[in-house]
Amino acid sequence: MQKFSNATEAALTLRPDVPVYCFRPQVLTADAKSFMEAFPGRTAYAVKTNGEPMVLETLAKAGVDLFDVASPGEFAAVRAVAPKAEMLYMHPIKAQSDIRLALETYGIRVMSLDHEDEVAKILRIVRALDLDPASITIFVRIQTKGHAAYELSKKFGAAPAHAVELLQRCHRIGFKVGLCFHVGSQIEDPETYERALASADWVRNRADVPLAGLDVGGGFPAEYGHDPRRKKPQMPGLGQIMSRLRSDIQDWGFADMPLVAEPGRVVVARAFSLIVRVLLRKGRRLYINDGIWASLSDSWTGKITLPARFIPDPARTRRTGNPGTISAFRVCGATCDSVDILSRPFWLPETVDTGDWIEIGHIGAYSLSLRTRFNGFYPDTFVEVETPFGEAEGYASLETMAD
Ligand SMILES: *Cc1c(COP(=O)(O)O)cnc(C)c1O
């Protein structure tokens, strides 16, 4: 992979017409380590967030030895780069053949569920493979409530009374049992974990079975940009969220049991930026060479304002507008699909024009993993970059607008 000091250097050297991902292994290593240091338990990286081999390999080197996986493709991706790493199969609803593959071929011994039919499915395979149920830990996933860019409790999780029954049923079979939740992605309310811990405590007290662990899931928010016309949302940083979570874990009496977290977004978001090119400017609209069917789907559905940095093409000699004036530009994607327009504008100097580049920061989570080949566009060009996005030249001047 070609290496550059920053994205501007990459853009001006390569003059790319296709989107280019700028990978920052040092940033990924640092963010993974700081999560692991701050969380009072084991860290299982959620592979779906970004399962690229370069990411999994860098994480394994940084000391991540536990991965949250959901499919045969993810089992194989982890095994390929980190053969000794342990995997947690935390998808509550699994295909029978995938359960068999996990137990038999990959030696996975931790799974989650939220329904008795899933207990029956797992038990059938455990019996067929002649495994001891006591060698397997089943995490019962409980429903949670809260605010996040992506709510997940409408889809997964057992109501508290149902979770009590499931814990007791799994315990009676001889499985080790634990409790888990996943509050959704990019939480928007720091109380979210406490509410989930309160439910977990209620379930634990009613179930009255020995618990092998508590898994608090993911959801830890990454830093993005914000709309300068609106008040900056009062969301505390990871440090504060973690110290709050640590004290909530104490207060609810979970500090003495094995704990797991499954962060995805917060670990990998800053590790990539994306250089896109302005294919055409039409008034206040920019048509770029990426979009919602490629790298920008998460920002579209999650209504996330992405931090954007202007990389002017020095070959353009005539420009109109004041370079110091930052304006909102509507961003249209590369495909011929009419919905391929971002839900949030980019904030850029008004001189931006056809042929210029834009570096989109903090794009490591749910970008590469959600790319499609729709309309024949599939961004797949990578370079390595040393300087963190926020420290790059031209970013500081826009900080008030796009931090
Ligand atoms: C997606 C997912 C995660 C990761 O969520 P982030 O918000 O990216 O941290 C963790 N656990 C489960 C079960 C998930 O589905």
Image (tube, rainbow, N blue to C red):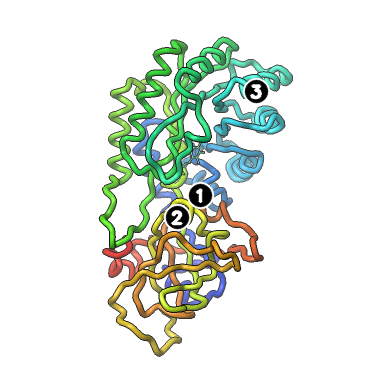
Q: Reply above or below: 269 against 72.
A: below
Q: Residue at x 40, y 89 (%)?
A: 318
Image position, residue 127 (x, y; %): 70, 17
Q: What separation in Å lies between label 3 and label 2 (alpha carbons)?
A: 37 Å
Q: Are the two marked residues, 2 and 1, in contact with CB atoms closer than 8 angstroms?
A: yes
Amino acid bearing label 2 = Ala
Amino acid bearing label 3 = Ile
Q: Nearer the viewer, mark 3 or mark 2?
A: 3
Work out whether residue 5 can be spotted: no
Work out whether residue 81 can be spotted: yes
Image position, residue 232 (x, y; %): 27, 54
Q: Residue at x 28, y 23 (%)?
A: 251
Q: Earlier in the sequence, mark 2 or mark 1?
A: 1
Q: Which mark is residue 58?
A: 1
Amino acid bearing label 1 = Thr
Image position, residue 9 (x, y; %): 44, 73
Judge the density around disc 1: few (<14), some (14-19), many (≥20) Cα neighbours within 10 Å. some
Mark 3 falls on what kind of element? helix
Q: Which mark is residue 122?
A: 3
Q: What separation in Å lies between label 1 and label 3 (alpha carbons)?
A: 33 Å
Residues 15 and 341: in front is: 341
Q: Reply above or below: 367 against 133.
A: below
Mark 1 falls on what kind of element? helix
As drawn, the residue found furthest toward the bottom would be 318
Q: Reply above or below: 385 against 252.
A: below
Q: Which mark is residue 271?
A: 2
- Looking at the rendered image, the quarter that the N terminus falls into is bottom right
Q: Residue at x 37, y 26 (%)?
A: 197
Which quadrant of the figure has residue 148? top left
Mark 2 falls on what kind of element? helix
